[in-house]
Amino acid sequence: MDICFETRDIYDILESRKLMPSPYNVIVFQYMIAGHIYDGRADKIGFMFDKIIEKFIAMKPHGAPLLLIINDIDHKSWICDYYNLFTKKLRKCGFEFTANKRHFEEREDGVSAGSKLYKVRTNRFLADIPKGHREKYNAHAPCSASQLIIEVM
C-alpha cells in the first residue's frame, strides 16, 4: 500500500497538470470547507467542488471505486449544508455513489442532519500515521469533526 500525504492549497493541486500518482483510490480533504469560510472564500466552494469532480472523480480509473472523505468542523449550517451541495453536484454529473455523513460528538441541539454518531472518538490509525504528521496535526486528540464519506463506483 502506498500512502502519500500532501499539505497544499486545493487550488494549486487543481491547477497542476500532474495531479496525483495514478491509480489512487482514497482521497481525504481536511478542513477544506471551513478554511474557505474563515478565509472569506465561501463563494468559491461550489466552483471548487466542480473542479474536484472534474479533476479527481471523473479521472478515476474506470471500474475502480474511489473513496472520498471530506473531514471538517461539525457545524450543521456552515459545513453540513455544503456536504449536501457536493452530493447534489455529483448526482447532477451522473455519478453512481453512496454517501454517508458521520460525526464524533453528541450535538447540543440533538439534530443529526442525516449524520450518524461514531461510537468512539479516538484515532484508531495512530500507528499508521508517520510520527511527524501525528505531532503536526495533533492526531492523538479525540476527534470532534464531521465527515462526508463518499464511495464513487
Image: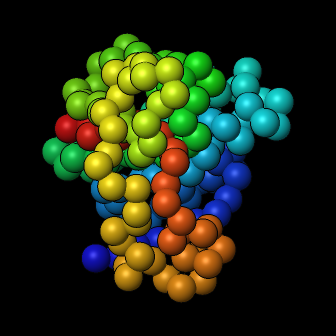
Numbered label tally: 0
Q: Nearer the viewer, residue 118 or 71?
A: 118
Q: Residue furthest right?
A: 40
Q: Position of residue 49 (x, y in %)?
A: 54, 30
Left or right of residue 145: residue 95:
left
One can see residue 14 in this view: no
Residue at 55%, 76% (x, y): give it. 134
Q: Position of residue 98 (x, y in %)?
A: 23, 31
Residue at 74%, 31% (x, y): give it. 37
Q: Tell me which corner region of the image, top left, top right, bottom left or bottom right, holds residue 125.
A: bottom left
In the figure, 30 relative to 54: above or below? below
Q: Residue furthest bottom?
A: 131
- Quadrant, the N terminus: bottom left
- Quadrant, the C terminus: top left
Q: Nearer the viewer, residue 29 or 80?
A: 80
Residue at 38%, 79% (x, y): give it. 128
In the figure, 79 relative to 73: above or below? above
Q: Position of residue 22 (x, y in %)?
A: 37, 62
One can see residue 40 in this view: yes
Q: Tell me which corner region of the image, top left, top right, bottom left or bottom right, holds residue 104.
A: top left
Q: Residue furthest left?
A: 63
Q: Tell me which corner region of the image, top left, top right, bottom left or bottom right, holds residue 113.
A: top left
Left or right of residue 135: residue 115:
left
